[in-house]
Image (tube, rainbow, N blue to C red):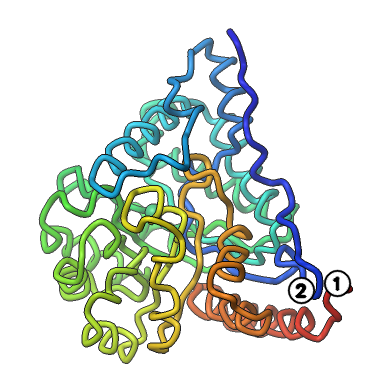
Amino acid sequence: MDIPAVPDLTAPVPTPPGRRDLAALPKAHLHLHFTGAMRPSTLVDIAREQQVRLPPHLLYIDPMNMPADGRGWFRFQRAYDSARHLVRSEATMRRLVRETLEDEAAEGSVRVELQVDPTSYAPWVGGITPALEIVMDEARAASSDTGVDVGLIVAASRIRHPLDARVLARLASQYAGDGPGQVVGFGLSNDERVGTTADFAPAFRIARRAGLVGVPHGGELAGPESIREVVAALNPRRIGHGVRTAEDPGLLDRLVAEGVAFEVCPTSNVHLGVYTDFSQVPLPSLISAGATVALGADDPLLFRSRLVEQYAQARDTFGLSDRELAGLARQSIEASLAPSSSKLRWFARIEEWLAAQPAAA
Ligand SMILES: [Zn+2]
């Protein structure tokens, strides 16, 4: 089988003269999916191991061809499913977790909240409980080796029955805790336009009773009306994406006042055709409204862009200063579900980053 050249997403992002290295800026990565975080080279490796021919749409993603309609989502979903079908052993699951934390460490992430839907991997490892335990176990070990603090978000899928979400919420509740690799939140992912949000409210109630925080997706593919439903039914502390709240300033002000944070993943928005390019992502509107924003990469495997690139694009497209970028990093840590003692330690490291002299002009 021909193995095509695959991009190295971990290659350093260049630092312009007079600016500070964004990979050295301590930050929290709060929107990252388990399979979507896979290195492209690992995808090629496991396809080779399984003697599976990778579908061309997984290997040749043309970032210049991003249609501004729903086709963006369906192409994405097909690619994601193809990648997920290759993750079918404990060894591969462990490899993904470990490599993700290694890559995050290289990017300056001090905290990662990794989303996983154990249902997808359950058939290969004996059920949803072992699937979750494998991820937790490797996350704990890799956290200790890399120094990256990690919490898990168990995410249900909108395209499955709401009763499945309740089963997952009960599972997640059993593993709630703020230690490394434990479950801190409960999410809802997949196509926002499918299903009735209110049907998932009982699952989120189960999770909340166990102390888990609600972090559902919303406000990327669908607009303000759908965000209102997510907020009313699921009572989230953070919204995965939520960028389209900017279309309704009244709603934005309300969510800011209620302390709901936004996990903004600009490259995802552009790849899925929500915005034509990075400059259309309403990051400046969210920031000026006082929103708490945590930049995220969502699915680096498919969007071909990791976390530091999101900060670099915010710098280059919107002209954010190092102080403003440090503010975003600080917000990402604030919005994380890490213990407050850890947050204070990381805030101090952000101040050190700002105090250090930038690269010579
Ligand atoms: Zn996502």
- What residue do we see at 40% from left, 48% from top? 271
Alpha carbon distance from label 1 to label 2: 6 Å
Badge 1 vs badge 2, beta-carbon distance below 8 Å: yes
Q: Give percent across and percent down for residue 246.
A: 30, 76
- What residue do we see at 76% from left, 63% from top? 15
Tell me where residue 284 sits by quadrant.
Answer: bottom left
- What residue do we see at 46% from left, 25% from top? 86
Q: Residue furthest top?
A: 1
Of 279 and 358, the residue lying toward us? 279
Rendered-image quadrant of the C terminus:
bottom right
Q: Mark 1 sits on what residue?
A: 359
Q: Give percent across and percent down for residue 135.
A: 52, 45
Q: Give percent across and percent down for residue 320.
A: 59, 78
Asked whether mark 2 and ligand 1 are closer than 8 Å, the reply comes as no
Q: Residue furthest bottom?
A: 257
Tell me where residue 188 sits by quadrant.
Answer: bottom left
Judge whether 36 appears above or below 175 on screen.
above
Q: Quadrant of ligand 1?
A: bottom left
Is 228 left, or right, of 212 in this rendering? left
**Callout 2 amino acid:** Arg
Per the rendering, the mark at residue 19 is 2
Is 138 left, or right, of 231 in this rendering? right
- What residue do we see at 54% from left, 43% from top? 304
Q: Give percent across and percent down for residue 312.
A: 62, 64
Of 266 and 172, the residue lying toward us? 266
**Callout 1 amino acid:** Ala
Of 350 and 87, the residue lying toward us? 350
In primary-sequence order, the first of circles 1 and 2 is 2
